[in-house]
Amino acid sequence: MAQYYDKQIETMPREELVKLQSERLVWQVKRTYENVECFRKRMDEMGLKPEDIKGVEDLHRLPFSYKSDLRDYYPYGLFATPLSDIKRVHASSGTTGKRIVVGYTEKDLDMWGECVARIFTGAGIGKDDIVQVSFGYGLFTGGFGLHAGAEKVGALVIPMSSGNTALQIQTMIDFGATAICCTPSYALYIGEEVEKLGVKDQLKLKVGIFGAEPWSEEMRLQIEDKLGIKALDIYGLSEVLGPGVSYECPEQAGMHVCEDNFIAEIIDPDTGKVLPYGEKGELVFTSLTKEGFPVIRYRTRDICSLNVEPCKCGRTHLRMNKPQGRTDDMLIIRGVNVFPSQIEEVLLKVSGGNITPNYQIVVDRVNNNDTFDVNVEMSEAFFADEIKSIEKTEKLISEQLRSMLGIGAKVHLVNPNTITRSEGKAKRVIDKRKI
Ligand code: DLL
């Protein structure tokens, strides 16, 4: 199999790259039409046949796909191969209690590993390196995704997963980790602890690979300083692949999209019109090589712009700028995707399905850690029945939130009419983090 992290692919002239994308797009549209009902229906409604798509120039004619499709076809309805060919699933938060599920064939897992391997080779990490993967392992794509890429470049992998910061630091020192992979906020927290312990000079770290949440240039400088490393940004989303969709090279000037596997577009989120390179809008991806769970024109809801100017590193694959927000209300708290609608669902459940109380989510960053508070107004209707004790109710809501989201929130029952009413849409989220 071709080495996807081979320099030849990453530095392929753009005309050749577009030709390759066109061939792959034609193949992907045809097989997705044949195997995925949701896509076929949309194409039929538009009077489009797979044969109408002759190359990248026809991409804009294809229908969009959305996160809600994953909910509507939960869990396996969007897979384009028989389930017996799917070798792994991962999952991420949906807008409601149901998680969104994605699947990978053996070839997909290999391609994923190759994409992530590009991150490491770009960062100068190879067989003599020791990579500590401190992203969560499990249904989240971070842990397993980085793990596979690090193995592909022949590095020694420490599958730490997230949490237990003291042990993270001790392991880094004892095992001689030369690279660390985690969320940037966790990296900064580790950096603070390293500073407090005064052990920076015992670290062998050269580079850090960070992503899964937005972070600023200011944060990058702090992390680089505290850990004595070069900090690189990586981007991805479960629906498209997981980590490895795009990555920074050492130039640290935008993230190269693995364009042999994914086509990126920027659209106006209101009109759906494709915008020229350089303009800011919603990022949309089409997966060209993925077999198990292909996406055609998937609306990421991330806002950013694309840069097709040649990069100093020599890679020809275009670069996306750091995402600068979202078109929906998704929050990323400690690397976990959280939708206000999920919190509503929990409150509705706790109230027995009758009423959603007035609530507000407050997110902040204290000592480089995200805080997550949910204020819930007490009301006669909500608390009439068996729920009497405030403490018990707070605990109950908090437990339900943890089981829905996978992260803990501090729940506070507050007096009626204490959450400020707004004249228009209720202001459900107060995000005080300066990112
Ligand atoms: O966060 C995959 C990932 C894992 C990426 C590890 C990088 C490292 P999801 O949980 O599906 O997948 O969340 C995807 O996270 O749509 C963005 O809004 C956000 N996101 C991911 N990377 C970045 C980044 C993983 N570098 C959602 N900068 C995406 C800003 C990011 N936002």
Image (tube, rainbow, N blue to C red):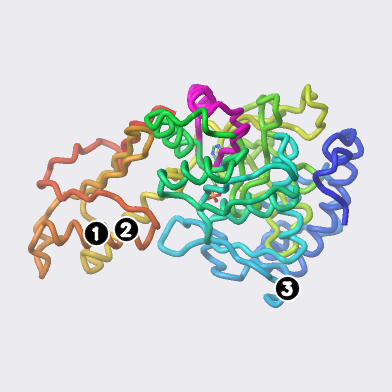
- Asked whether residue 226 is drawn in magenta, I would say yes
Amino acid marked by disc 2: Leu
- Asked whether residue 421 is drawn in magenta, I would say no
- Identify the magenta region: 205-232
The residue carrying mark 3 has its beta carbon less than 8 Å from ligand 1: no
What residue appears at the point 25 percent right and 35 percent down from the top-left corner?
Answer: 423
The residue under label 1 is: 397
Q: Do the CB atoms of the residues marked 3 and 1 lie less than 8 Å apart?
A: no
Camera-nearest residue between 409 and 420: 409
Q: Is residue 227 visible?
A: yes
Amino acid marked by disc 3: Asp
What residue appears at the point 10 percent right and 47 percent down from the top-left corner?
Answer: 416
Give x and y (percent) for residue 75. Answer: 55, 70
Camera-nearest residue between 378 and 234: 234
Amino acid marked by disc 1: Ile
> How far is mark 3 from mark 1, CA to CA?
39 Å
**The label number, if any, that marks residue 85 in the structure image:** 3
In the rendered image, the vertical position of residue 347 relative to residue 212, given as above or below? below
Q: Quadrant of residue 31?
A: bottom right
In the rendered image, the vertical position of residue 428 relative to residue 321, given as above or below? below
Q: Do the CB atoms of the residues marked 1 and 2 lie less than 8 Å apart?
A: yes
**The label number, if any, that marks residue 179 in the structure image:** none
Q: Which quadrant is home to the C terminus?
A: top left
Q: SS class of the residue under badge 3?
A: helix
> How far is mark 1 from mark 2, CA to CA?
6 Å
Q: Which quadrant is home to the N terminus?
A: bottom right
**The label number, if any, that marks residue 401 in the structure image:** 2
Residue count near mark 3 (Cα–Cα under 10 Å), binned few <14, some 14–19, many ≥20 = some
Q: Earlier in the sequence, mark 3 or mark 2?
A: 3
What residue appears at the point 41 percent right and 62 percent down from the top-left corner?
Answer: 97
